Image (tube, helix red, strand yellow):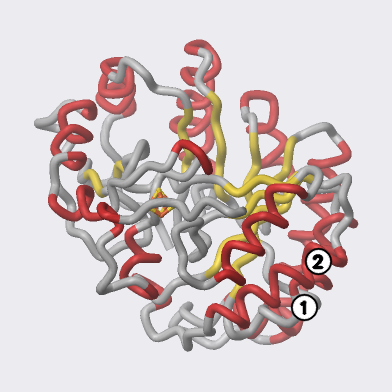
Amino acid sequence: MAEPAKLPLDSMLSRLDEVEHLQTISITGGEPTFSDKTVKEYIIPLLKYARSRGVRSQINSNVTLDYNRYEAIAPYLDVMHISFNYTEAADFHQVGFAKSGHSVSYEAAARLYERMIGNTKRLSAGGLYVSAESMINFRTHTKMADIHKLIVEMGCKRHEVHPMYPSAFAVDLPVINKKEMRDSIASLLDNRDPSVWMLFGTLPFFHCSEDSEDRTLLRRLAKEPNVTVRNDPDGRNRLNVNLFTGEVFVTDFSDIPAFGNISSDRLDALFERWIDHPLAKSVDCHCPAVGCCGPNLLVKDMYYRDVDFTVREAIQER
Ligand code: SF4
């Protein structure tokens, strides 16, 4: 229940200093705010560094700890990112502890669930930008509209929605098909609160798809007010640094091993190395007419294993 030692903060900051075009940092976990000492001695100084450099910051937290821990971070943070895939405490009990390795009572889970909701409401009411992310998977795909309603009630300013892919911790996840995914997104669009920004990412639909229903959904998404479909940063313009070991990965979701360490490599050099990697090249397509920068590696692996995106092009609609 204790965190191992981390790299000295100064070595992380000097590596960040070397990155010429750094625009954002995300601090993720596990639970990055788990240790009060880490919050004070590591996270707040990292956030202050980002502010001083004009770099945007995000923390991915489950906000289930004492409120004062988040209150201390809030003044230096741009976005508090939470995961929210639930319609009630029973969902949280079932999903939130699926990989915990020990049994957790319903009562204990329900207390954490209530605290997560209470903390989110307080942080939102205090002016912090809270973005809630939900994953579309076999468990949630018919419940997305109800999940969205709770996210709106908590005062979140953005609802981020991604399909969940069977990788890393979710490797044994039952797969839903593309029609179920499309139906889930359509129902969410039909029932959403349009005043809340909805940000979709990692979608398995592309304008070069031969399936016209994929393209129809993309056209609808482009027309909806306050809806964005982002291109995926992982593997394109984002690196992940493990602050315990210094190892650098291309994305937190893929099974690609570390390809460098900040103790010996500059981040810009590591990024160049990744961009030259055959795997990166396999999804290196770009269709400016539809604003698409190609698929995420996980998406390609799950739905398009035999497709060569480098020879495809967006289909122009008549
Ligand atoms: S950029 Fe790639 S994935 Fe996107 S439409 Fe073009 S060929 Fe398809």
Q: Are marks 1 and 2 in contact (CB under 8 Å)?
A: yes
Q: Give the residue at x 69% y 54%.
A: 221
Q: Which of the 4 image quarters holds residue 94?
A: bottom right
| Residue to which mark 2 is pinned | 114
* Quadrant, the N terminus: bottom left
Q: Sequence order check: which comes first, mark 1 or mark 2?
A: 1
246 over 185 or under it: above or below: above
| Residue to which mark 1 is pinned | 89
Q: Is residue 317 left or right of residue 227?
A: left
Residue 245 x/y as whole percent: 22, 46
Q: Give the residue at x 33% y 52%.
A: 251
Q: Residue furthest left?
A: 264
Circle 1 crowding by C-alpha within 10 Å: few under 14, some 14–19, many from 20: some
Q: Which of the 4 image quarters holds residue 9?
A: top left
The three-letter amino acid code for the residue at tag 1 is: Ala
Residue 194 x/y as whole percent: 87, 50
Q: How many marks?
A: 2
Q: Kindly report the distance in space between the C-alpha atoms of the residues bearing marks 1 and 2.
A: 8 Å
